[in-house]
Amino acid sequence: MTTTLLPRARIGKAPVAALGLLAVSTGALESVVTPTLPLLQRELDMSPAEGALLSIVLLITGALITPVAGKFGDRYGGKPVLIRLMAVVSAGGLVSALAPNLPVLLLGQILQGAMVGALPLSFILVRKHLPAGEAKVAIGVVSGLFVGGGMAGTLAAGPVAEGLSRHWMFALPTIAVTGSTILVNRLMPRDPPGRPDDAGVDWPGLALLSGTLVTLMLVLALAPDIGSQPLVLGVLVVALAAFVSGWIAVERRAASPMVDLRMLARPAVWKACVLTFVICVGTSAAVYLVPQLLAVPTDAYGFGAGATAIGFFLLPGAVAASLAGPVSGIGVRRFGPRAVVTVGIVLMAAALIALSAAHTEVWHLITGKALIAFANGLCVTALVTGIATSVDQGDTGIATGLVLVTRVIGFAAGTQLCGALLTAGTPAGSDVPAESAFVTGFVVAGAVTALSLLVVRTLNKGDTK
């Protein structure tokens, strides 16, 4: 079957504006769970470990969908793939809005995870329809609007959930996603498809990686109940080992693997993956534990913050994260990735340890969370820049794909670990974890982050140039 190439159509400001609106709405929908997680746990009677699972399923789906979406976008055109992905996201938002219980809400979040593939597809569209200089500006605008949408979602989720209901918290940004998708479909010309990829998509590898991540999350979620469910946990551990073994075997033999494991033999790649994993474990501790600690009742040791207040308290962290990328880029140009990563790790470890010792005032948590978010942005940007320039140009996508998967695994593992610590530290008959569980979470995350400096010390010029 021959593919008919459509003529390239140069776009004006309206289609780019439609992509910007889509970025704002998806950023808002993605961010509503974090500030309202304590509220969702109360209303749906979730344990801390279950709450941790809810907070990461969207990210896991996104990591699995993004490489497939990018390949399909190159093959069939960015617009049709983007519209179909957004239809899935809208369906997921509707499911989340109507969800009566945790399993249905998890399903909605899984479907919403398709939104993570929207940004790469948007970039494909602007690159195909605009000259190089204008495309860079448009990509920067769309990326910035996605971050802005995330900030808006963080601020608005609490007031909407408390003033209306948790259902509207998902419904309103879903309506915005649907409307902006219709605008993109009307205003954006269809881009010409690329050349067919004979290797196709690594579906077996994708399925096995999905099984690996889901099983890993279940193992971490059930770890606190090992005494009451040892057989279930044992079966899950065996299943996890089987998924990992099968995935490695498939990826080593696939003609076009989803994740090229042979790249891990390169020092620049495996060191970047190790550092990314550890850094995301540390970041996830703050992302999960700080809102939980803010929500602890005042008659215990917390602040009794509602979803609205938590959203405001988290905003400085979101701003810090948005500033970290440009600062890291400047630092990498002047001092190199190794120096920037070192500064980021030291800052993050110090902030985590400080939070374990000082968390009796709201400003302690706000400052610590902002410093950790800034440090994470420094490190991730520097690592991506370093890995992108340390491999051959044709291997850039493969290497950065490995870092992406590692980032998701690190964030998910850290979040589930913290959830398990809070669940294990909750006395029988109480809904409030012991304060020592939070302290343990911050200390463990800080210690693990600090140990990553041993890997940074082994970086050489060949790993960072």
Image: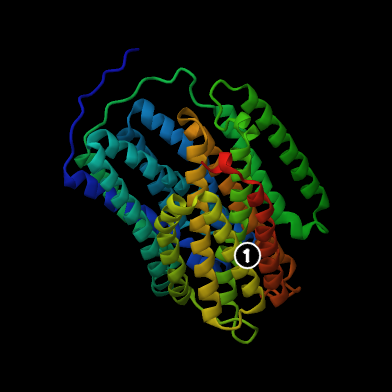
Which quadrant of the figure contains the N terminus? Answer: top left
| Residue farthest toward the top in the current orientation of the protein | 1
Q: Position of residue 367 (x, y in %)?
A: 51, 74
Q: Residue at x 57, y 70 (%)?
A: 290
Q: How is the image coloured?
A: rainbow
Q: Rate crowding at label 1 as few (under 14), some (14 to 19) or many (20 or more) other CA atoms within 10 Å.
A: many
- In the displayed orientation, state which residue is furthest to the bottom: 299
Q: Is residue 14 left or right of residue 310?
A: left
Mark 1: amino acid = Ala
Residue depicted at x 65% and y 53%? 413
User: Does dot 1 land on a helix, a strand or a loop?
Assistant: helix
Please tell me which residue is depicted at 23% across the width and 46% down the height of the picture: 16
Q: Which residue is mark 1?
A: 349
The residue under the point 54% across, 65% down is 372
Give whichever of 439, 89 is nearer the camera.
Answer: 439
Query: In this orientation, which residue lies closer to the viewer: 13 or 3?
Result: 13
Q: Indicate whether 214 appears above or below 195.
A: below
72 or 324, which lies in front? 324
Coordinates of residue 121 in the picture (x, y in percent): 36, 39
Q: Quadrant of residue 75?
A: top left
The answer to whether 260 appears left or right of 137 in the picture is right
- Please indicate, yes or no, whether residue 164 appears anywhere in the rendered image: yes
Image spot of residue 77 (x, y percent): 32, 30
**Does residue 373 sit above or below 273 in this rendering?**
below
- Taking the image as shown, residue 220 lies to the left or right of residue 189, namely right
Residue 42 in sight in this render: no
Q: Is residue 210 left or right of residue 91?
A: right
Residue 174, percent across and down?
A: 36, 54
Q: Quadrant of residue 162?
A: bottom left
